[in-house]
Amino acid sequence: MNKFAVIDIGSNSVRLMLVADGKVLYKTLNTTRLGEGLASSSRLKSEAVARTAAAVTEFFHRAKSEAASLVYAFATAAVRTAENGAEFVSLVKESCGLTVDVISGGEEAEIGILGALGNDDGGIIDAGGASTEVIVRKGGTVLYKKSVNIGVVRLKDMCGTDKKMLEESAKSAAKSYGKLPCDVPMYAIGGTATTLAAVLLEMKEYDPSRITGTVITAEKMHFLSEKLTAMSAEEIAALPGVPAKRADVLGGGAVLYSVLMDTLGLSRIIVSDSDNLEGYAKKHGLM
């Protein structure tokens, strides 16, 4: 059995995917908030760096203990935009010998659509912790690709849970996307999108096969933004399908998606559990 692992070092969570003979065995995560504070500082916080490097190291050893012959790791917005991103990369290298691939916003969009759609036409929105990528492909050609430094952790840092501030910040960032070049099915990937789908499905136990294909209309997303921003983090965490460590950013995430759907003229999005983890593996010929 040929096993390998991919670690995604995001601005909100570190995720591990273990694959055997081209099949995903499981995904798991540790919410470490590497990107906290980047809305007001150009540097990663030392405590966030330490706990995130520790999480990456733990996942690396877990993958090796489960017979992964190769372990890959990539980092996104928090590491690529921070002044001390290279220091984080060095710490991971010292901790477990793993070389972290720091990818651009464009590359992040590309592996996101590859993971969710393979080579099919369509588009994706990936609202992460510190950046949000939008990409559109038609006729096998990428017609549009943009990454903007807005995400659920940045929104929380800037606005807390103030709905008006969240909407204003999201609308300001959304202007950067302009108009999409064509009409294609649009998908949403990443933890915010999958958690919002789980809330709609009232999913007590996360099931990726049920998440993938879930349609969220603009009306439902607006409903979620209204509902979640009126609740405390503790109340949100008590909802079926919400991980406790994501509860405090989920309302802002719903607002961000609602604003993006309105700005981009989308009546619905389709949620996919397959995302940039699968995309990174496919890009490197592993799946």
Image (cartoon, helix red, strand yellow):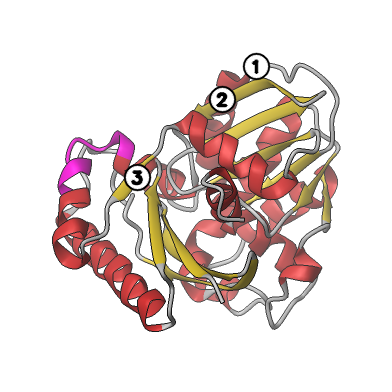
Alpha-carbon distance for marks 2 and 3?
20 Å
- Packing grade of label 2 (10 A; few <14, some 14-19, many >=20) is some
Label 1 or label 2, whichever comes before in sequence order: 2
Q: Using the image, determine if residue 66 lies above or below residue 225.
A: below
x, y percentage for residue 264? 73, 26
Viewer-proximal residue among 158 and 82 = 82
SS at mark 1 in the image: loop
Residue at position x 59%, y 27% in the image: 174
Labels 3, 1: front one: 3
Question: Is residue 255 among the parts visible in the rendering?
Answer: yes
Residue at position x 58%, y 58% in the image: 191
Residue on which the image places disc 2: 146
Q: Using the image, determine if residue 87 lies above or below residue 263.
A: below
Predominant secondary structure, magenta span: helix
Label 2 or label 3, whichever comes before in sequence order: 3
- The answer to whether residue 209 is left or right of residue 105 is right
Segment colored magenta = 80-87
Residue 178 image label: 1
Residue on which the image places disc 3: 101
x, y percentage for residue 40? 27, 38
